[in-house]
Amino acid sequence: MALVIVAALTGGGVFLFTSSGDEKVPDEVNESAQKIDVANRTFESNDPVSRGCALDLDILTRIDRGTVPEHTEDLLFVPQAPNYVGTFGIRSHSGPWDYLQTIPLVLYGPERIVGQGRALDRNASITDVYPTVGRLTGVELPPRRGQVLEDALKPDVPGVPKLVLTVVWDGVGRNMLERWPDAWPNLARMERKGTSYLGATVGSSPSITPATHSNLGTGAWPKDHDVTSITMRFGDEIRDAFAGRIPSDEKLTTFADLIDLAFGNQSLVGMLAWKSWHLGMLGHGLLTPGGDRDLLGLVGQSEEITGNPDYYYTPEYLTPFPGLDERVEELDRDDGEVDGLWMGHDIAKLHDNPAWVNYMGDALLETMEQEGFGRDDIPDLLFTNFKMTDIAGHQYSMDSPEEPVVLQAQDEVLGRLLRYLKENVGDYVVILVADHGHTPSTESSGAWPIAKGALQTDLLKFLDVGEEDSPVINTSAVGMFIDAGKLAATGKTLDDVATWMNDYRLKDNWDDELPPGYEDRAGEQVMSAAFPTSDLPAIMSCARSRS
């Protein structure tokens, strides 16, 4: 395929493209692709409302929860599962399907959390963390979408925990845990000795880092807290959420904001993570009326861990925080050859390997020790995100040999954290969740990776305009931002574009002979539905009537 992809799939959380020139495809026949039932993947109608209404109500509900018209893409599309926007080498994970929505939600704390002996086959939501931490700390929070996880909490335990630590394993949905069942023994022990919900979901789509972390922090859906994706529209501007590390994009307070206020700003509140995309679970710091500067540490490409002094503080011992070079060297020597590579990849280039996992764990433990998290009887709140599993999933796939190695490294750091808490805090609660699942390899799923560059090029042919007159501002993993004026100049409408896209075929998205295993799927429509965002209310009404 003669396509050079130079931009990130911002709506799907892809950070780096390595493909250039001809697209790399599997060398062997894709048997999973051959097993797809093509007859069930074509539709009689391409009408946007009809196609949208035909989606399962659960799917549409997740999309509706994640949609804020003034921020969301103008045109939404839902690829036919397990299709995704990306390439054979780089995957996105934004979607409403169960395999991207179902996540671990595990609570553990010997003093306060019920030891169930096994994971519970019950439903829950990431929004349930908000009221549950409110109950644990004795703070009556404003009611929102989440519900207190009553069966996790031991009754009649006096006082409050000294520390609630929330750990996000980025991209580690239930599908990844099931794929690599031997890579997470410490989490498995937490599941047995604490309370774990097998039916937990993030609950809204796109299943994307800023939105779902904000679900966690606020106990609400994007339609309430306003953070819908990575790339969002703000008036005439389209930019990343939390750009400039400014928390104002999130319109609701978090449980950390409110609990800190309830204790007169005497609680220690902080977060160590990878990007400002995770601010939605921490909160607003000094921007909160009556609030103070909470701790913020964002890990970059060097030993400088930084923040934003306008709203947060970053301790001097983190700027820089030494030890990255040692962790890189340790991993480099692990395979017996000092060459700067881990499993054939540059160790220092991406946060995709155990060196970064261990460095993150070192920084987190040092922060807890230096700041005194959990040292007194006022409840402290600490948040962290381990991004490495997510990046490995994007770059190599959740089925790759790299993924279980990274997952096991994160589990080992979890063990270090639990030992520290047992020895130094005593009365604590750990909540471990993920922000979404991940996308299997095409070899295992038979998915077609929808090339967004080809999709945009073909759309311009349909509109009969050149690149300079393109109405497409940005294409994400779930839709397109459209320049209304330029679209009007073509004589077409959003309904016209959606109708065209609903008939877009697998053969249209590939310039050459289809890859092995896909030859018999040329006429398959790649989308389950495409529709203007403005049609979503009508689609929801139609689907509810149908149900």
Image (tube, helix red, strand yellow):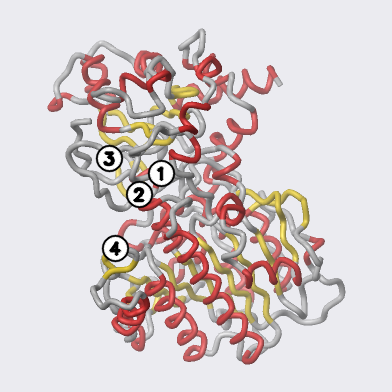
Q: Residue 14 carries which label?
A: 2
Residue 14 against residue 45 in the figure, above or below: below
Q: Which one is in front, 409 or 420?
A: 409
Q: Position of residue 333 (x, y in %)?
A: 32, 80
In primary-sequence order, the first of circles 4 and 1 is 1
Q: In this view, does 378 lie to the left or right of 24?
A: right
The answer to which quarter of the image holds residue 105 is: bottom right
Q: Which mark is residue 92?
A: 1
Q: Find the distance from the CA under tag 3 to the CA under tag 4.
A: 17 Å
Label 3 residue SS = loop
Q: Which of marks 4 and 2 is in front?
A: 4
Query: Mark 4–mark 1 contact, CB under 8 Å?
Result: no
- Residue annotated with mark 4: 345
Q: Find the distance from the CA under tag 3 to the CA under tag 1.
A: 17 Å
- Residue annotated with mark 3: 24
Badge 3 amino acid: Lys
Badge 2 amino acid: Val
Query: Mark 3–mark 1 contact, CB under 8 Å?
Result: no
Badge 1 amino acid: Ser
**How many C-alpha atoms fall within 10 Å of the one at disc 4: few (<14), some, or many (≥20)?**
few
Q: Find the distance from the CA under tag 4 to the CA under tag 2.
A: 17 Å
Q: Is residue 142 left or right of residue 37?
A: right
Q: Find the distance from the CA under tag 3 to the CA under tag 2.
A: 17 Å
Q: Which of marks 3 and 1 is in front?
A: 3
**How many C-alpha atoms fall within 10 Å of the one at disc 1: few (<14), some, or many (≥20)?**
many
Q: Find the distance from the CA under tag 1 to the CA under tag 2.
A: 6 Å
Badge 4 amino acid: His
In primary-sequence order, the first of circles 3 and 1 is 3
Q: Is residue 234 left or right of residue 404?
A: left
In primary-sequence order, the first of circles 3 and 2 is 2
Q: Position of residue 251 (x, y in %)?
A: 49, 53
